[in-house]
Image (cartoon, coloured by chain):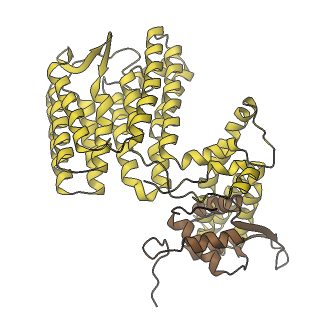
Chain colours: A brown, B yellow
Amino acid sequence: MARNRTLSPHARALLAILLEARGEWRHGYDLARMAGIKSGTLYPLLIRLEKQGFLEAEWQAPVEEGRPPRHAYRLTASGVALARDNPLTVAASPLKPMRS
Amino acid sequence: MTPGFRRTLALRLTNALLALLPPHLRDWGLAIRFELETIADDRDALRFALGSLLSLAPRAFAFHLLMPLTHLVGAEAHPMEATPMTDLPDDLFHRPRLFGLTCGIGAALLGLGYMTMADAPGRYLMVQSLALVLGLALAGIVGRSDRASSGGVMMVLASILLATSLTGAGIEGAHRWVGIGGLFVQISLIVVPSLILAFARSRNSLSTVAMIVTAAALAAQPDRAMAGMLAAGVAVAALHRADRRTVIALAASVTGFAVTLWRADTLPAMPWVDQIYYSAFAIHVLAGLAVMLGTVLLLAPALVGWRRDEANRASYSVFGAVWLSAIVAAALGNYPTPVVGYGGSAVIGYLLSLSFLPKATPSCIGVELPTERRKDEADHHMCIGIAYSH
């Protein structure tokens, strides 16, 4: 049985964004912006999540001619469970508060 | 800098990263390279590329450095997959103490290389090697103890230091050493770094008194290098949290340092110990490089920890200040060159001080996989279970 331990705020923020996507594919730059983390933090996290089976990655064909393909990500079933077990708390969130 | 230049630079950085990455990470390099095309703002694109390069390039370098070792130890190294060995650098970066111990061992071995090239006596090499083994053993014991940073333990160590100042062996008016089995052991180099880091971690009345006793002991010896280390370490701790106890400790350590500056320090330079930043290159360029690289390794735990573990930056910055001050003192005066120069006390002191760094950073995903999955993917276990435990 999987045993949960404390995740970093960045990992929680990333998992929360991917969980919100509800199985939709997400791209690296969008994830970085939405989770409020830098690319230098994002990619090691994505690599690790993918290696541990919490994340799926696939190459998507370009939507416009002349554009390169894009790498897209979504949570696996175990990733969804991990995200649910480790919700993002307001105190630990790396997301900047936004004015309404 | 024009926008076109930023975009070009970002592309070049991601291309360089792609070239560096080992086969099993190349898809990720391509992902970053292609993602750049979707970022409209050149400044953001450059930030994105630079961040990716800075975080993944060290892994790539480590992979290439460790590949020959992987083959040497006979581990299977499938070209398209990560192996436990290739995960080792990543794991190390997330375990500050383990990473520090690796750096300390590396620096000590480079120091032994320098001493060999500098024709140091065989006895020196043996003493340095024994100090390395002893330091590792002590670091293992102290690292497991919950009482290492307690005020009582700190008071005992500070008292031993004070006793050394009052009754220890004297050379040219300085009383810094204790004779053990024909060796002169500099107690301050062993205990002061740990005392500073313990104080930065746990500040109470007793630990503050221990800092005052330490400052008095170093002033009495006198030892400018160690008094400077104490003042620098406590000053950096105060920058992170300037409560009343820290201010008192800082005042005591600065006063102690001022006393050492005022008192004469006429100790001559010792071969293989002092002034080796200047003399090593004269022996051989490799000897000089060994000393320089070893010195950089001493600061690597602070630099890597500062960058990767924001929650514990105070510990890393105090650790960095402590050892940087020792290095600066060795560069400026006749004081021991830590770890890379001859002197077992510094080797033991450095390894012991690592026990006060966090055990693990919170950046690694810390979830254990089901047993059946672990069997299939043995390489995962290097990273799993590293939790934010500090």
Nearer to the camera, B315 or A1:
A1
Q: Quadrant of residue B265?
A: top left
Nearer to the camera, B329 or B306:
B306
Looking at the image, residue A7 sits to the left or right of residue A25; the answer is: left
Residue B384: percent from left, percent from top: 61, 54
Residue B80: percent from left, percent from top: 81, 49
Looking at the image, residue B389 sits to the left or right of residue B155; the answer is: right
Query: Does residue A10 sit above or below B234 in this rendering?
Result: below
Query: Does residue B352 sit above or below B178 in this rendering?
Result: below
> In this orientation, does residue B110 appear?
yes
Residue at the far front in the pictured view = A1
Q: Quadrant of residue B218?
A: top left
Residue B37: percent from left, percent from top: 72, 70
- Picture mark count: 0
Query: Does residue B115 sit above or below A58 in this rendering?
Result: above
- Residue at 17 percent of width and 31 percent of height: B217
> In this orientation, does residue B260 appear?
no
Residue at the far bottom in the pictured view = A100
Looking at the image, residue A52 sits to the left or right of residue B347; the answer is: right
Nearer to the camera, B53 or B236:
B236
Residue B18: percent from left, percent from top: 73, 54
Q: Quadrant of residue B148?
A: top left
From the image, which quarter does the N terminus of chain B lie in?
A: bottom right
Nearer to the camera, B221 or A49:
A49
Looking at the image, residue B12 sits to the left or right of residue B348; the answer is: right
- Residue at 48 percent of width and 57 percent of height: B388
